[in-house]
Amino acid sequence: MSVNLVPARSATAEARRRQIVDATIAVIATEGYAQASFARIAERAQLSSTRLISYHFAGKDELVLAVVQQVLTAIGDAVGPQVAAQRTAADRLRSYIESVVAFTDDRRDAMSALLQIVLAGALPSGTAADEPVPGHVEAILRQGQSDGEFRDFDPRVVAAAVQRSVEALPFALRAEPDLDCAAYARELVTLFELGTRRTGA
């Protein structure tokens, strides 16, 4: 019988870690990655000392990893079921675009923080966001080609184009907070429907 010798974190410790991660997201989103010092994060989280951060995280790298993991988990929880519920590759691609845009609109700070971490070159290696090509989108495209829904094209190129299109939204929202995200999603859906569908069949 195996015994887990690593003590589980208490509910209080988990709540404190979440508080620190949320404060880190807010600081990065509003002030930039370079400004996300423990001092600024402690101030944002209304902590009495930065030692409370150091108690829960060994350093900034570990804290950034927690931020990335939290955001990616939230994206997966929001987008994954929506995409999985679709029957065709075209519908899965549409659902992916719409779901990511809706998530970005709803969780602006989280998405802004994630992309600023990426642009700062601070993304921890081995995370899902670190993959060079968005494999989940590429898989949808390859399945669509296999099923005869999509025309012949390079799935890696188109997958990258889809991903970069949705990743641009946080920056567009920063410049134009009242941007119509539903219209943004519709334009992207139309663009990639026209670009991927098989014609003349």
Image: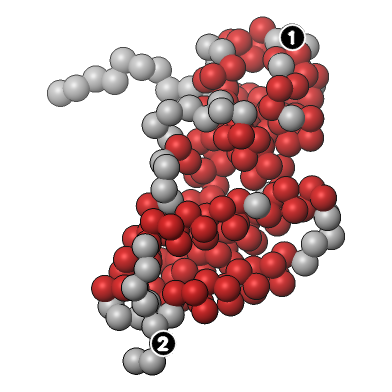
Residue 92 lies left or right of residue 44; in this view the side is left
Identify which residue, 160 or 67, lies in the foreground: 160
Q: Position of residue 178 (x, y in %)?
A: 84, 60
* Mark 2, other Cα within 10 Å: few <14 / some 14–19 / many ≥20: few
Q: Which of marks 2 and 1 is in front?
A: 2
For label 2, the residue is 199
Residue 126: image quadrant is top left
In the rendered view, would you say 190 is above or below 113?
Answer: below
Identify which residue, 29 or 44, lies in the foreground: 29
In the rendered view, would you say 169 is above or below 90?
Answer: above
Query: Which SS class for mark 1?
Result: loop
For label 1, the residue is 49
| Residue 87 visible (yes or no) | no
Q: How far apart are marks 2 and 1 (CA)?
A: 63 Å
Q: Which residue is drawn at 43% across and 57% down?
A: 157
Q: Which residue is drawn at 65% across and 52% down?
A: 168
- The amino acid beneath tag 2 is Thr
Q: Position of residue 186 (x, y in %)?
A: 64, 74
In the rendered view, would you say 158 is above or below 64?
Answer: below
Placement of the N terminus among the 4 image quadrants: top left
